[in-house]
Image: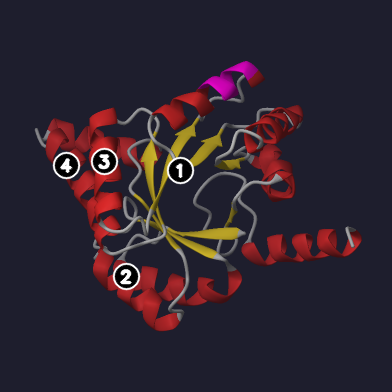
């Protein structure tokens, strides 16, 4: 399953990119931390009008370069807590709208995640909770990756997402070894390496049982380092499926 992130900086561009992405992916991620003037109900309604059954993942990232810049600016203006409140209100709204997935981060407060899980149950369990962890410095040991997995599970993850950064090609082998272990633990998992040297794991992870992998809308629309264009990913998967039959 290929997921394309919609991380356009304006709502107008987001509508354009959603339209382009529809036929190229199985899952759409709305990066509400990137879409500055994004109105979530409006975006969801637009997606439903285009393809009624298209699964949607709503993410409001608090880590990463863009998110950290925003948080620092908010804290400088004395609005740090307000920005975090806005983030959780957006995720709660996503649950009310019945999106397929919402993304929280492993180091989020357990109480806040618990409140979101309670909401998910109240709204008929239409939404699954993705608990994610990103390591922008490198790929840790297998033991550490397993520990991160367990921490995500303790936070209530329905889907565990762990994405380290590949500093060498061998790091792909580490994350794929982890994925082979994690798949046997009984929860859906997303795991691959960021970075140019991590592209192998982006391609290979679905073959190892990952729930989905990420691709870019095109060469100019990457949401993270190392993302391949969705059309290229689709061609690669088609070739691999043919060879496997």
SS under mark 1: loop
Circle 3 sits on which residue?
70
The answer to whether residue 76 is left or right of residue 46 is left
* Screen quadrant of the C terminus: bottom right
Earlier residue among tags 4 and 2? 2
Can residue 109 be seen from the camera position used here?
A: no
Which residue corresponds to the image point at 29% horizontal and 29% vertical from the top-left? Answer: 110
Earlier residue among tags 4 and 3? 3
* Closer to the eye: label 1 or 2: 1
Circle 2 sits on which residue?
43
Q: Dot 4 surroundings within 10 Å: few (below 14), some, or many (20 or more)?
A: few
Which residue corresponds to the image point at 32% horizontal and 55% vertical from the top-left? Answer: 32
The answer to whether residue 245 is left or right of residue 225 is right
Up/down of 30 relative to 175, above or below: below
Earlier residue among tags 1 and 2? 2
Circle 4 sits on which residue?
85
Can residue 192 be seen from the camera position used here?
A: yes
| Residue 191 position within the rendered picture, expressed as x and y whole percent measured from the top left | 60, 39
Q: Dot 2 surroundings within 10 Å: few (below 14), some, or many (20 or more)?
A: some
Q: Using the numbered discs, state the Cα–Cα distance from disc 4 to disc 2 in whole angstroms.
A: 21 Å
Task: Please tell me in which quadrant of the rendered image residue 173 appears.
Answer: top right
Is-magenta flag for residue 8?
no
Image label count? 4
Q: Dot 1 surroundings within 10 Å: few (below 14), some, or many (20 or more)?
A: some
Q: Residue furthest left?
A: 78
Residues rendered magenta in the picture: 143-147
Which residue corresponds to the image point at 68% horizontal and 30% vertical from the top-left? Answer: 181
| Residue 55 position within the rendered picture, expressed as x and y whole percent measured from the top left | 46, 65
Circle 1 sits on which residue?
158
Residue in front for this viewpoint, 163 or 96: 96
């Amino acid at each position: 399953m290929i997921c394309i992130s919609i991380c356009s900086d304006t709502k107008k561009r987001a509508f354009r990119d959603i339209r382009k992405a529809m036929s190229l992916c199985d899952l759409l991620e709305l990066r509400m931390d990137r879409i500055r003037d994004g109105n979530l109900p409006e975006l969801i309604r637009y997606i439903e009008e285009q393809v009624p059954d298209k699964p949607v993942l709503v993410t409001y990232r608090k880590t990463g370069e863009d998110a950290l810049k925003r948080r620092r600016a908010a804290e400088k203006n004395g609005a740090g807590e307000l920005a975090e409140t806005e983030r959780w209100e957006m995720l709660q709204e996503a649950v009310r709208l019945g999106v397929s997935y919402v993304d929280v981060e492993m180091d989020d407060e357990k109480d806040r995640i618990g409140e979101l899980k309670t909401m998910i149950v109240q709204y008929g369990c239409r939404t699954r909770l993705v608990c994610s962890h990103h390591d922008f410095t490198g790929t840790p040991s297998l033991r550490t990756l397993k520990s991160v997995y367990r921490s995500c599970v303790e936070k209530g993850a329905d889907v565990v997402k762990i994405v380290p950064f590949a500093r060498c090609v061998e790091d792909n082998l580490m994350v794929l070894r982890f994925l082979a272990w994690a798949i046997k633990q009984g929860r859906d998992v997303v795991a691959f390496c960021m970075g140019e040297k991590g592209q192998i794991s982006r391609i290979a992870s679905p073959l190892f049982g990952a729930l989905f992998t990420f691709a870019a809308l095109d060469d100019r629309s990457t949401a993270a380092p190392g993302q391949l264009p969705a059309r290229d990913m689709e061609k690669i998967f088609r070739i691999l499926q043919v060879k496997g039959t």
